[in-house]
Image: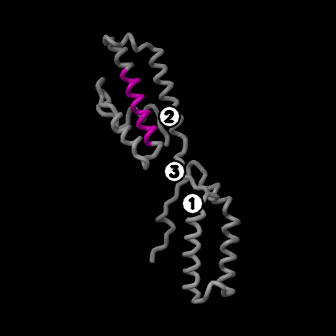
Amino acid sequence: MNISIKAIHDAPVLPDAGSPKRASLLPKILDRLEDPNAAVAEKIHLIAIEIAGIAQGMQRNEEIGTPGSQSKSPVEQVKVLRLLSRTLVESYVPDTRDALDMNGPKFHFVFSKILDCFKDALMQATQKPLKDALNRSILKEFADLIRERQADIQREVDKPEFSYDVERDVPHR
């Protein structure tokens, strides 16, 4: 996720961004924090927008000389901006929910189920049992290919810019 200060100010989720009394995003942030399925990057993005709104409000108060503006010293503004900066840096941490650990137990479970499907398809296609020489040869070749390509596959999915369109390579019957 690439977030810039300009993007935060231009974000459509900033309610009435031109108003000194813009609506707070805290209720939305709390909802996302309580939702275990919400992406960490989305939560941090909302927090960054709220912090930027606070910093903008502090600046507006200083510019128009509102009664409370003396308590919002430049030091306070710098603190808020540093917090915003840290929040934005944290938002670049990849979301670990979508990490692929090819040595992890979940991957091994899923792969074993896929392998079972492959074996069933092989027996149906060849009309022969798994112990047949042809089927054993195909399974051995499949295992060798997986072993050879495993490091390359892991390297590819670990790239920050990784994306894959599932629909692209799924054959339709």
The residue closer to the viewer here, 118 or 74, is: 118
Horizontal relation, residue 82 to residue 30: left or right: right
Residue drawn at the location 57% of the way across and 75% of the way down? 116
Residue 9, position as x, y percentages in the image: 39, 31
Q: Is residue 169 magenta?
A: no
- Bounds of the magenta segment: 42-57
Q: Nearer the viewer, mark 3 or mark 1?
A: 1
**What kind of residue is marked 3?**
Arg
Q: What's the distance in space between the residues labelled 2 and 1, CA to CA?
A: 31 Å
**What kind of residue is marked 1?**
Lys
Residue 15, position as x, y percentages in the image: 30, 34
Q: Earlier in the sequence, mark 2 or mark 1?
A: 2
Residue 28, position as x, y percentages in the image: 35, 39
Q: Of the numbered discs in the image, which one, if any, rests on residue 88?
A: 2
Q: Of the numbered discs in the image, which one, if any, rests on residue 97?
A: 3
Q: Check the image and report above or below for 144 versus 21.
A: below
Give the residue pinned by disc 1. 106
Residue 22, position as x, y percentages in the image: 30, 28
